[in-house]
Amino acid sequence: MKNQLSTPPALLHAAALAAALLALTGCADMSGIAPQARLRDAATLVDPGAPAAAVAPDWWRAFGDAQLDALVQQALDGNPGLRQAAARIARAEAFTRSARAALGPQVNAGADLTRQRYSENGPYPPGQAGSILNIDTARLSGSWEIDFFGKNRAALESALGTARAARADADAARLLLAANVVHAYLQLARLQEQLQVADRTLAQRGEVLRLVQQRVSAGLDTRLELRQSEGALPEARQQIEALREQAALTRNALGALVGEPKAALALTPPALAAMQSAAIPAVLPADLLGRRPDVAAARWRVEASAQDVAVARAQFYPNVSLTAFVGLASMGLGNFVEAGSREWGVGPALRLPVFDAGRLRANLAGKSADLDAAVESYNAALLDAVRDAADQLASSASVERQIAEQRQAGEAAEAAYAIARKRYEAGLGNYLQVLSAETQVLAQRRLAVDLAARRLDAQAGVMRALGGGYAAS
């Protein structure tokens, strides 16, 4: 590098001038302006001895449902939100190319043709004064800003950090979209099975009503039991209608997620029992924070903001560039291409801020504040990631325990209901006992469906919280 700077005399002069002007940079004072926020140590938030997470990038396939796989893939291919994310990546990469271009020389070509009358009373020699002449210029000019103080390099690193953050944001959007599709699909499955329970409930209450009508005709029951049975039917129909409404709204939401409103209307109602359970870890993995795209995006924004601060600091120092030009210039086209019309020039140019009324200090203070905000945003993302993963693991473990308890309660409720029906049919019990036992059975069946859906949804939540197989490129 020393040889490269010392060979051209213009570069040697530029370096000497820059060194001479460094003493003047005290006129633009940077003292007292520095970022205050500090990055949290990610290693203190998770157990370093915990096993690493192993989540596949296509984690939803672990449920073994081909229809769900097709929906997620359709959403990833056609969702407008992901296309917006792709556009943001393209814009960030364009800024990166622009910042990289500033590190190299710039060459421009220009040509001018001006027809001008010169004043007879102006400072022009005889022959030119009062005449009308063509002034012709063709010039090839170039410049190269010598990045002594790293301003352009820092700007490039800032652009690279922004582009990497945009890519991580896109990965986070893909992960969230896939998780939302899985959640909506499981919600639809839950509602369909709840509708089956509600349909059976309506049929059972119709049978009970017919039994009560027969007993009233025989004088074994009163109109009180008859009215109770009649009121149970519209209640059951109302529950069915509410479930149908929720199912329709869920289909609409699913259609919006996949980018095709009619796609969800043609779905075959999935069966929760046919879907496989996914294997998930029991504790927070040690590599959790490195596999979360939202955390990665926040970290790259910190890097980009730190480089922006470096750019703001470099603006306090001299701006050194080398300029050169070569071309032709003449009055009149007749001698434009003659050797005497040639012109060229080369030399260094230096610019040093001496007084700017505080503009550079204000810019540095603003960039430092941006860095503080980026650091605190990263710290918040760390804490939220750990909380999110811990919540999902806790919910998944709790649902498994709830399912075990519900299974026992459901078996007991079914047995009690069977006994109550037999006693009522034998004339040993009353209808209120049957209705009470039936209510418990239906509640347990509904709870069983909800827990089955929650089990799969919690497993999907764990895989999303663990990063969904994200790995920074």
Image: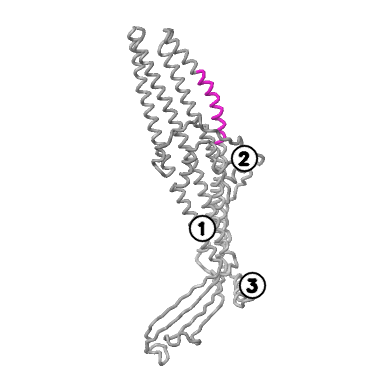
Residue 347 in view, yes or no: yes
Q: CA distance from mark 1 to mark 2?
A: 33 Å
Give yes or no for contact between labels 1 and 3 (Cβ–Cβ under 8 Å). no
Instruction: Give the alpha-carbon distance from disc 1 to disc 3, as whole Å.
Output: 31 Å
The amino acid sitting under disc 2 is: Pro
Is 134 drawn above or below residue 148 in the view shown?
below
| Magenta stretch, residue numbers | 391-412
Check if residue 31 falls in the magenta segment. Answer: no
x then y, percent, for residue 293:
55, 47
Look at 42% across and 44% down and name the residue there: 259
Magenta-drawn stretch, dominant element (helix, strand or loop): helix
Q: What residue is pinned by disc 1?
A: 93
Q: Is residue 395 visible?
A: no
Q: Which residue is mark 3?
A: 4
Mark with earlier residue (1, 2): 1
The foreground one among 448 and 99 is 448
Q: Is residue 321 above or below residue 42?
A: below
